[in-house]
Image (cartoon, rainbow, N blue to C red):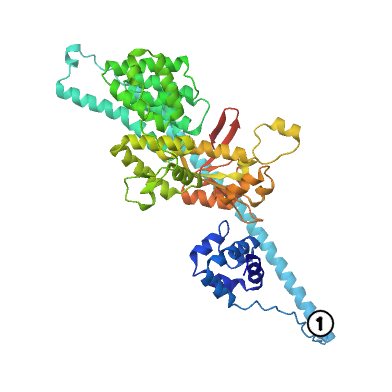
């Protein structure tokens, strides 16, 4: 039977019987139910029936079972016989009217009682709210008085007695204790902020960092670490002020004598093809610090490691090193001697069979479609390969970077974080409202959605799950491109006639991931408040995420 004949036959068969047979064929069920919820009702959908009809010629066992089913019986509507009921006597009718009148009066009385109780309940709720507000006011007043008394007590404390310089000379043991204390004070705050940043609390890190950096009593090491975390948080969100803050973090790290931390912050400040004068000056200070401490070789190894992990920043860094003079020419890495074609097979040292033998193109495709398990295994294998065979690992990463820079970031980033994207909201976002008013025609943009997706992949977000309303395909101008994205499972569509909001919230909670949308989701109340929501803007320099 052809696919068209199968479609006609499947339309006549009972969907419950088809669903019963498909339970024994999980692979076929998964293939035909992509984008739909599996069930007997779903089998009535023309798209699902078409997929099943195309899959049956490849599955003769299931086809034979379906041929044995009988078509669904057509139920004929038989009118029920009309039974004439004699009208009740006049006396019975009068009694019924009287009883009905009494019941209506009783219901009216109950409604009045319920209304009175509702008024009393509202009054009690109002009194309760006033009591809670009064209690909170008293608590705040007590805390303010306690803080004032504490300040007065500290102000009236006697000044410390000056100690002669001779008594300030610590013994070797004392020096070690003091040094450990200073190190501890300088380390725990940046470490705590870094843990928050890894868990995805970018907005909290930004707020705490701003408050801490206003404290002039912070030790130099602590200030450097906090400034660095603050700059990295801005950079992960793509904020316009991120490069300036990265330069400030570089300056602070250099003042604290932290070489590699300063180098990493300087690398994040390279956002253009050519380094600025300020970045060249910071690089000169970095080189001087490395030379003074005898760590030029360490710095050279760090520079070489940036070739594949951050290719654009690496090119800018090489330009800055070339202008630094011949004295530091040895830091410029030589070209890689190993070259790999995109389809050349590489054996990764891992126990996972799925990535034991891969190509650069396969890994890029896995990133593209969001295969989380395979990418996690590949990241482990690439890390091991960098230790055992650095030249081969560098060649593989170079081949991946030539195919897709976002895929290279996904495979080499220090941390990955899943993210959910409201594809309909992003595609309909108006970057230039004035231009939209002139055009008087608003269409959804697939290119804008892909631009945001590439930005997220380039900033360590993976997998990127894009969920769209079913009607988005009718609003986009690039219909062929949109259909291919849906076919490759890069975009997931909801069922026709349903909103994507519920699925977006469900996926965000299931993956513990932020939701990228400018929609406030006001209709969802506490369900929307329980997830992290990030807004976005599209400007001439790219994308910027906005903490909600």
* Quadrant assignment, res 429: top right
- For disc 1, the marked residue is 93
Which is more toward the observer, 416 or 503? 416
Residue 170: image x %, image y %?
17, 19
Q: Where 160 falls versus 126 (above or below)?
A: above
Q: Quadrant of the C terminus?
A: top right
Residue 148: image x %, image y %?
41, 27
Q: Is residue 163 left or right of residue 304?
A: left
Residue 216 seen in this snapshot: no
Which is more toward the observer, 363 or 102? 363
Q: Where 366 falls versus 141 (above or below)?
A: below
Which is more toward the observer, 103 or 447? 447
Q: Residue at x 67, y 56 (%)?
A: 497
Residue 122: image x %, image y %?
62, 52
Q: Residue at x 49, y 39 (%)?
A: 457
Q: Residue at x 22, y 24 (%)?
A: 178
Q: Is residue 492 left or right of residue 149?
A: right
For this orientation, the residue located farthest to the right is 90
Q: Where 165 falls versus 75 (above or below)?
A: above
Which is more toward the observer, 370 or 41? 370
Q: Quadrant of the N terminus?
A: bottom right
* Quadrant assignment, res 69: bottom right
- SS for callout 1: helix
Residue 333: image x %, image y %?
35, 24
Q: Is residue 16 left or right of residue 270?
A: right
Residue 453 seen in this snapshot: yes
- Tell me if mark 1 has few (under 14), some (14-19) or many (20+) residues whose alpha carbon lies within 10 angstroms of its own: few
Q: Residue at x 52, y 36 (%)?
A: 455
Q: Is residue 488 left or right of residue 418?
A: right
């Amino acid at each position: 039977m052809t696919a068209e004949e199968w479609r006609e036959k499947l339309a006549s068969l009972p969907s419950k019987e088809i669903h019963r047979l498909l339970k024994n064929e999980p692979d076929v069920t998964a293939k035909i139910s992509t984008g739909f919820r599996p069930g007997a009702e779903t089998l009535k959908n023309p798209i699902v029936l078409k997929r099943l009809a195309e899959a049956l010629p490849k599955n003769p066992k299931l086809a034979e079972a379906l041929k044995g089913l009988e078509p669904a019986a057509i139920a004929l509507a038989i009118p029920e016989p009309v039974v004439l009921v004699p009208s009740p006597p006049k006396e019975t009718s009068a009694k019924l009217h009287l009883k009905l009148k009494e019941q209506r009066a009783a219901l009216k009385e109950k409604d009045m009682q319920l209304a009175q109780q509702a008024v009393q309940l509202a009054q009690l709720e109002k009194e309760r709210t006033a009591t809670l507000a009064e209690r909170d006011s008293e608590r705040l007043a007590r805390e303010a008085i306690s803080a004032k008394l504490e300040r007065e007590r500290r102000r009236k404390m006697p000044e410390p007695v000056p100690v002669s310089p001779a008594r300030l000379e610590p013994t070797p043991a004392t020096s070690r204790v003091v040094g450990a204390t200073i190190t501890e004070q300088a380390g725990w705050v940046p470490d705590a902020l870094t843990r928050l940043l890894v868990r995805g609390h970018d907005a909290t890190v930004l707020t705490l960092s701003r408050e801490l950096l206003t404290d002039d009593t912070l030790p130099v090491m602590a200030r450097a670490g906090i400034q660095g975390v603050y700059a990295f948080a801005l950079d992960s969100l793509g904020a316009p002020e991120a490069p300036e803050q990265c330069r400030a973090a570089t300056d602070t790290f250099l003042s604290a004598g932290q070489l590699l931390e300063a180098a990493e912050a300087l690398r994040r400040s390279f956002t253009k093809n050519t380094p600025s004068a300020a970045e060249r000056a910071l690089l000169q200070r970095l080189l001087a610090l490395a030379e003074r401490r005898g760590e030029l070789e360490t710095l050279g190894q760090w520079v070489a490691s940036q070739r594949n992990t951050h290719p654009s920043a690496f090119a800018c860094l090489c330009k800055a090193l070339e202008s630094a003079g011949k004295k530091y020419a040895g830091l410029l890495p030589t070209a890689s001697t190993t070259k790999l074609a995109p389809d050349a097979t590489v054996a990764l040292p891992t126990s996972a069979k799925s990535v034991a033998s891969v190509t650069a193109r396969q890994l890029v495709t896995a990133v593209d479609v969001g295969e989380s398990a395979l990418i996690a295994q590949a990241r482990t294998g690439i890390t091991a390969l960098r230790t055992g065979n650095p030249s081969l690992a560098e060649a593989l990463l170079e081949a991946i970077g030539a195919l897709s820079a976002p895929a290279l970031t996904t495979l080499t980033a220090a941390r990955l974080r899943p993210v959910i994207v409201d594809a309909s909201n992003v595609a309909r976002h108006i970057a230039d409202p004035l231009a939209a008013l002139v055009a008087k025609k608003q269409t959804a943009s697939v290119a804008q959605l892909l631009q945001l997706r590439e930005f997220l992949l380039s900033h360590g977000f993976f997998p990127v799950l894009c969920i769209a309303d079913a009607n988005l395909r009718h609003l986009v101008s690039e219909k062929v491109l949109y259909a291919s994205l849906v076919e490759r499972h890069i975009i997931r569509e909801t069922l026709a006639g349903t909103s994507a909001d519920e699925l977006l919230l469900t996926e965000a909670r299931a993956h513990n991931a932020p939701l990228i949308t400018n929609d406030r989701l006001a209709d969802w109340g506490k369900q929307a408040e329980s997830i992290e929501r990030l807004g976005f803007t599209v400007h001439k320099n790219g994308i910027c995420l906005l903490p909600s």
